[in-house]
Image (cartoon, rainbow, N blue to C red):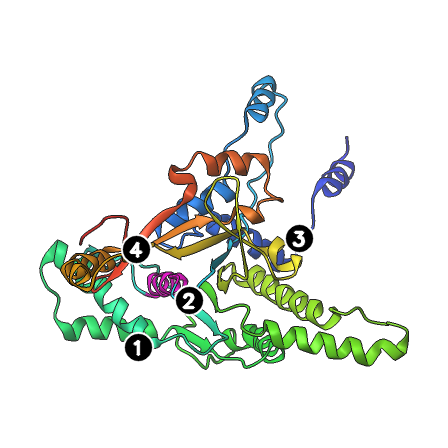
Amino acid sequence: MSADTLGSYLLEESKEEGLDELLRSLWQLETSSSFSLGFQPLDKLLNAFQDPPMTRQQQQVHTQWSTQNRLRQPPKGKTPPVVEIAGATACSGKTQLLYHLVSLSLLPPKIHDVALGGKSHAVVLFDLSSRFSVLRLNDLMYSHVSSNYSTSAGALPDQEISSLILDSLIHLHIFRPQSSSSLLAALGSLSAYLLAQPPNHLSANRPLGLLAINELSAFLWQDRLDGDEDASFSMTNAGERANSGVFLYRYRAVVSSLRHIQQSFSCTIVATNWGLAPVSSMTGQPALRPHLPSVWNNFCTVKLVVERDRISKFGPGMSVEEARREGSQRWEAVEKSGFSVWINWACSDGWREEVREGVRGLERGGGYSFRVNRNGLLIGNDEN
């Protein structure tokens, strides 16, 4: 075989790839195992969705293949997760959980060799209800840092803690759109804002680790009203648009923009939401029927339900004196009560079988409980 023939043969087998595709492939390989929020209960649950164990049938097929005949494929980059945290009632705990995830993304991994569990990432937050409190976030971050440091290496000066939190909070970018249209505009301009040269923010050297949305359904009723008015207007045009055309279009556009941002920055997306229709699930755990279009439901990796632990009420026949005697005990029970988090099995129709088996194999089916006190968010019965 001549050199020219050999060269042509090798050239035909080679694959052309642009520099952008090569850099993206390297980025995916580097970050394929780094989609961690730093919150162990949620990270374990997401791992069951992203790296589910093989089912028994898959294991049988896998063992039948010989090592020689097994296809060798390059590792594929993981898709960053999309998490919805929903509650059926007010004060259900979903915003507290969001505060904790945001603080972990912003804080550094450690300070003076004391682990803080942070990620040193930049965070973009779309506060659709304008109720996200930076002061509350600051207090929780302060409690998290001081409690972790005091249990390991004594006390850290207040001035140093405040400086650490300030250095972290400058990497939190908050947008407060007032409608779905302004949300779409903000999403569309986000890449240009983050990648501007020269940068007009201080997070240019940090990866975007988390894109958070507070109260995803904040514009739900306005969007439905706009859809109804649009349908009434278009009835004279032989029903050119469906009754929910505007409603569906806006959510499709939002999901399309979020998917584009996630592909560009490889960031995790976490959205809080409220539930309209509680239903019973096969597992007996709380579940919420989805009220948003299927394009959002299919976009989510997992949906969680958060609810406050219930405290028994006073009996109907209890006297005032008896209520006063039990008052201190009941107040203590209220202070020790917390929140429970469960997987929303009402949205599990599209799960693969290996994902179902992986979730069932988790302790409490992937559920967990937490409390919020002066030291921040505590998992389970942790009293620190």
Give whichever of discs 2 and 4 has the lower sequence position.
2
Q: Position of residue 54 (x, y in %)?
A: 53, 30
Mark 2 secondary-structure assignment: loop
Q: Quickly name the residue at label 3.
A: 17
Q: Is residue 298 magenta?
A: no
Answer few, some or many: residues within 10 Å of disc 2's Cα (few below 14, many 20 plus, some between 14 and 19).
few
Q: Quickly name the residue at label 1.
A: 135
Mark 1 secondary-structure assignment: helix
Answer few, some or many: residues within 10 Å of disc 1's Cα (few below 14, many 20 plus, some between 14 and 19).
few
Q: Quickly name the residue at label 4.
A: 311
Give whichever of discs 3 and 1 has the lower sequence position.
3
* Residue 112 quadrant: bottom left
Main secondary structure found in the magenta portion:
helix
Task: Give, as a three-letter code, the residue at label 3.
Answer: Glu
Q: Which residues are magenta?
A: 92-106
- Closer to the camera: disc 3 or disc 1? 1
Give whichever of discs 2 and 1 has the lower sequence position.
2
